[in-house]
């Protein structure tokens, strides 16, 4: 074994034994060389290997530090609550120390430039970093077409209000769909219509008829890991949506908020099939790091850039947050954390399916066979009273969300369902929570 391999093994052992704690500074290169009886270059190589595998990170003129290594902890809800309602990431796996390091490094790198007004389009260096970052998701775009927004909600609101080249004003949305956006559209009195989507997908013939009507400026969709369904469109459906957009001059607003949980070419976004520049791609960072960062990225076709910039108007996103995100992506921490979150969520989704097999023996709850991401739709018998079901489960400290809020107020062709989110449900709570849901569904949600 080469000397640097033995040094790496020894340091990893000390980490596991707790001799080095998260965020703690490691011995200097010279001190470590003297301690392990080797050359400085050997220590530099060992530290480099540990940094490459995301066990430590470096700060210029300061040294090497151990990254945060948070294991999946207890439930975020506390007080014995089983939280199947919250859409926010698990507080127990937030990379606090890692991101603190990135904040410090960003300040050291950019200094006073982070405390000016900046460019309304976003920090230039972050947008250039996102060019290669987004390319990994099969989204190829120049930095000039990327705009940083204060979360994806801001981008959605701008797109809803701004004029489009076609002169059309109506918005088409999936039903069920993103509840917060639906409420915004209704509150603003914007012209909006719904089109049905189920776990089986969307009726492409009906979608084409809607596009051909000449009424719609955009179609808002979540092709992957849909909220609240949890399902994804097939490759054929994504290709068809891109083709129909170009044929009928309807822009697709692709909310790829869970892109980080995808893997492989079968998860390519609609954007990857766009041949006519009719797809607006939205990428969120809130499901992987901190929702409070309020950072999103929008990839816009050229014809919409100037109008979008004009409606955005000013710098409203923290330059410090943008710079820290840039560092977080560049040093590999983002990718490391993404894989960790992805594996954790996959275990929880699998636990839901296993619990359903154990407790839903009468088949009262209908769940898609392919739900993934963090959400799952539980379709219920028509005899179940949703309001009472939510209330009774709440009394048992099992929090769920009724499906009623995921529809436009005037949309009639609704399924009766509840949405399950696993982002805050502890792995050891899931079986008990699903058992409780099945028991209350058997009672019809009644008293």
Image (cartoon, helix red, strand yellow):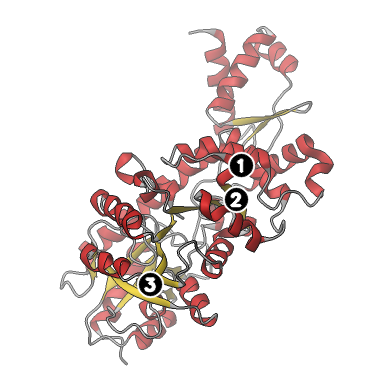
The answer for how far apart the CA atoms under marks 1 and 2 are is 7 Å
Q: Which residue is mark 2?
A: 147
Instruction: Say whether residue 158 is left or right of residue 26.
Output: left
Q: Where residue 155 is drawn, which disc sits there?
A: none
Instruction: Say whether residue 268 is left or right of residue 319.
Output: left
Work out whether mark 3 precedes mark 2 in sequence or the reverse, and give the earlier one.
Answer: 2
- The residue positioned 52% from the left and 14% from the top of the image is 5
Q: Where residue 215 is drawn, which disc sits there?
A: 3
Q: Tell which of 31 and 120 is nearer to you.
A: 120
Task: Determine the secondary structure under disc 3.
Answer: loop
- Residue 91 found in image quarter: bottom right
* CB-based contact (under 8 Å), mark 1 and mark 2: yes
Q: Circle 1: is it few (<14), some (14-19), or many (20+) Cα within 10 Å? A: many
Q: Which residue is mark 1?
A: 127
Q: Tell which of 280 and 2 is nearer to you.
A: 280
Q: Is residue 295 visible?
A: no
Task: Find residue 189 and report its horizontal and vertical position in percent.
Answer: 51, 82
Work out whether mark 1 precedes mark 3 in sequence or the reverse, and give the earlier one.
Answer: 1
- The residue positioned 31% from the left and 60% from the top of the image is 352
Q: Quadrant of the C terminus?
A: bottom left
User: Is label 3 or label 2 in front?
Assistant: 3
Q: Circle 2: is it few (<14), some (14-19), or many (20+) Cα within 10 Å? A: many
Work out whether mark 1 precedes mark 2 in sequence or the reverse, and give the earlier one.
Answer: 1
Task: Find residue 84 and report its horizontal and vertical position in percent.
Answer: 42, 68
């Amino acid at each position: 074994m080469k000397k640097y391999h033995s040094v790496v093994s020894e340091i990893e052992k000390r980490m596991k034994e707790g001799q080095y704690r998260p965020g703690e500074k490691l011995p200097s290169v010279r001190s470590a060389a003297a301690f392990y009886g080797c050359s400085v270059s050997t220590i530099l190589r060992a530290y480099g290997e540990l940094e490459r595998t995301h066990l430590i990170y470096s700060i210029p003129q300061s040294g090497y530090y151990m990254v945060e290594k948070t294991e999946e902890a207890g439930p975020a809800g506390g007080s014995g609550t089983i939280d199947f309602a919250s859409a926010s990431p698990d507080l127990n796996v937030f990379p606090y120390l890692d991101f603190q390091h990135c904040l410090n490094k960003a300040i050291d790198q950019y200094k006073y430039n982070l405390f000016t007004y900046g460019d309304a389009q976003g920090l230039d260096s972050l947008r250039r970093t996102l060019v290669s970052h987004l390319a990994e998701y099969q989204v190829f775009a120049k930095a000039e077409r990327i705009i940083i927004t204060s979360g994806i909600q801001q981008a959605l609101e701008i797109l809803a209000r701004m004029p489009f080249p076609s002169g059309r004003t109506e918005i088409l949305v999936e039903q069920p769909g993103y509840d917060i956006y639906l409420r915004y559209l209704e509150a603003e009195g914007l012209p909006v219509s719904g089109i049905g989507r189920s776990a089986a997908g969307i009726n492409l013939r009906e979608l084409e008829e809607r596009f051909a009507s000449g009424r719609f400026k955009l179609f808002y969709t979540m092709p992957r890991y849909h909220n609240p369904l949890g399902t994804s469109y097939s490759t054929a459906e994504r290709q068809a949506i891109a083709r129909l957009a170009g044929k009928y001059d309807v822009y697709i607003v692709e909310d790829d908020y869970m892109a980080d949980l995808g893997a492989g070419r079968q998860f390519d976004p609609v954007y990857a099939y766009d041949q006519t520049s009719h797809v607006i791609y939205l990428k969120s960072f809130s499901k992987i790091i901190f929702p409070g960062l309020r950072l999103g990225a929008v990839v816009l076709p050229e014809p919409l850039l100037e109008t979008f910039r004009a409606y955005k108007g000013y710098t409203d996103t923290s330059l410090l947050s943008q710079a820290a995100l840039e560092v977080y992506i560049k040093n590999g921490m983002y990718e490391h954390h993404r894989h960790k979150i992805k594996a954790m969520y996959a275990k929880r989704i699998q636990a839901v399916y296993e619990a359903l097999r154990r407790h839903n023996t009468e088949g009262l709850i209908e769940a898609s066979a392919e739900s993934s991401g963090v959400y799952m739709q539980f379709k219920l018998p028509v005899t179940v009273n949703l309001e009472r079901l939510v209330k009774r489960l709440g009394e048992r400290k099992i929090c769920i969300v009724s499906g009623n809020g995921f529809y436009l107020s005037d949309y009639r062709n609704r399924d009766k369902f509840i949405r399950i989110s696993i982002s805050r449900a502890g792995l050891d709570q899931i079986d008990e929570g699903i058992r409780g849901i099945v028991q209350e569904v058997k009672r019809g949600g009644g008293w």
